[in-house]
Amino acid sequence: MFQSLSERLGQTMDRLRGKARLSEDNIREALREVRIALLEGDVALPVVQAFIERVKVRAVGQEVLKSLTPGQALVKVVRDEMVEVMGGSNSALNLNVPTPAVILMAGLQGAGKTTTVAKLSRYLKERHKKKVMVVSADIYRPAAIAQLQTLAGQVGALFHASSSEQQPVDIVNGAIDAARRQFADVLIVDTAGRLAIDEAMMAEIKALHGALNPVETLFVVDAMTGQDAANTAKAFAEALPLTGVVLTKADGDARGGAALSVRHITGKPIKFIGLGEKTEALEPFHPDRIAGRILGMGDVLSLVEEVERKVDKDKAQKLAEKMAGGKRFTLRDFRDQLQQMNNMGGLGGLMDKLPGMNKLSPQMKAQVDDRQIQRMIAIINSMTPGERRFPKLLNGSRRARVARGSGTTPADVNRLLKQFQQMEKMMGKLKGGGMKGMLRGLGGALGGGGFPGGFPPR
């Protein structure tokens, strides 16, 4: 996410951190580099100008030049202003209203509205324990209603049926009645999109807004359209009383221009950010955490929250007790660890939140492929229960059989077994040296060809 912007800004910030003294000339040169990085990141020009001006005012004052560590102080000023540009703090949904709380989704065709409706349903259901109903008022796009019905089934949301023969206003009025009858806490309304903003589209969405009187009107926009995303959001904000923005496809956006431009141009907060195609790939937008990711400082808070939500605590506890009791770490245990990592978004998802990852070489980043984990799980699944428990049984012919069964090569099987041995040693440290011993072992595994680059890219 935002790789190119992160790399450029990260290099500039690293140079500044080490400086014990700064002059106005140093600061002017550093801000010129920041300005170029932001413009190349497709951040809107008015946003760049306002951002640089605010940083300059703070940088040449007491806050930086008189600081004991002026380089670090300037980095902090840049980070703080970046947080402010993106909204300062997370803006949560307002659901403290009589049920059903209605959320209206607006946006252009192809921005990911329907998928976002499903993601938001899952988010509200799992994290806020809400009973959610969804309805499609898109009577133009073929199969739009069927698509939403399928997604609703996947995330466990109620679905209010509609058809292309109905009028959108009639559809939403019927959905409100159904939501009340079925005691839904939240009703999310998917609307029609167009390839471009037009009068008919705006008239229809205004009519829907009037009929629904939603508590939240969210504009869904594709982050990869850069500053065009901010301009489109502005047009919608002028036509509708938007309460917030959802940035989609941010995992594929190397530039970051939309994230840094939308709030400043529209005045509306970014409430959520989509980071993948899966229905769980929606996160609340925290400006301070996103700024940390962009500047290479990581996002440890989000990582901790993700571990809390997605790690199977029972399995983790059983493994800890097993290791503490002196029992053997097996390939089945190793597979469980790989599956837990997969549930947390794979290696790519973890690395995006760890500090300093923007400093990795392009070659190392290319090796971080989540398909590695899938291949490793497939290899272990192709083994017999006895082989998983006693890896020493895996002689040459057995390894060849496992490779055929998993669609890999004997070399891949050998590589997996080597990584398993490293992990086995690491787990053994839990008996011999507790957590400190385990961390020493982890450092050795990572330095010795273990994760993340154990398998060659394919």
Image: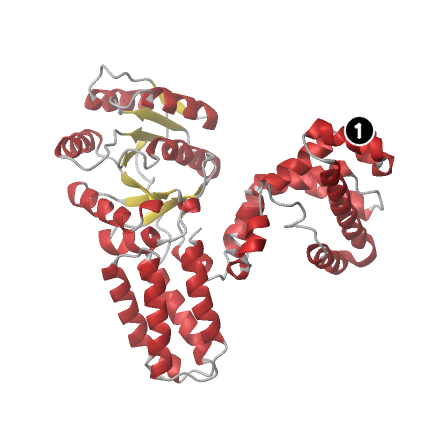
Q: How many marks?
A: 1
Is 226 positioned to the left or the right of 405 in the image? left
Query: Image height check: is 302 above or below 291?
Result: above
Quadrant assignment, res 215: top left
Residue drawn where x is 39% and y is 42% of the image: 249
Q: Is residue 141 left or right of residue 197?
A: right
Residue toward you, 380 or 236: 380
Name the colour scheme. Answer: secondary structure
Alpha-carbon neighbours of circle 1 within 10 Å: few (<14), some, or many (≥20)? few
Q: Residue at x 37, y 56 (%)?
A: 89
Which residue, given by chain and number where applicable, does mark 1 sit on? 385
Q: Nearer the viewer, residue 85 or 232?
A: 232
Residue 15 appears in the figure: yes
> Who's the residue at 14% across and 32% down the image?
203
Q: Pinpoint residue 397: horizontal percent, then vertical percent.
A: 83, 31
Regarding residue 394, the answer to whether it shows in the image is no
Q: Amino acid at mark 1?
A: Pro
In front of the other: 225 or 159: 225
Please, is residue 271 above or below residue 134 in the view? below
- x and y percent of residue 91 in the render? 34, 50
Q: Which residue is at 46% across, 67% downward?
A: 11
Query: Residue 155 placed where, x, y %?
Result: 46, 28
Q: Residue furthest top?
A: 165
Where residue 337 sits in the image (x, y, percent)?
A: 68, 42
Q: Nearer the viewer, residue 296 or 226?
A: 226
Left or right: 314, with 155 as reference point: right
Q: Quadrant of the C terminus?
A: top right
Which element type, helix, strand or loop, lies under badge 1? helix
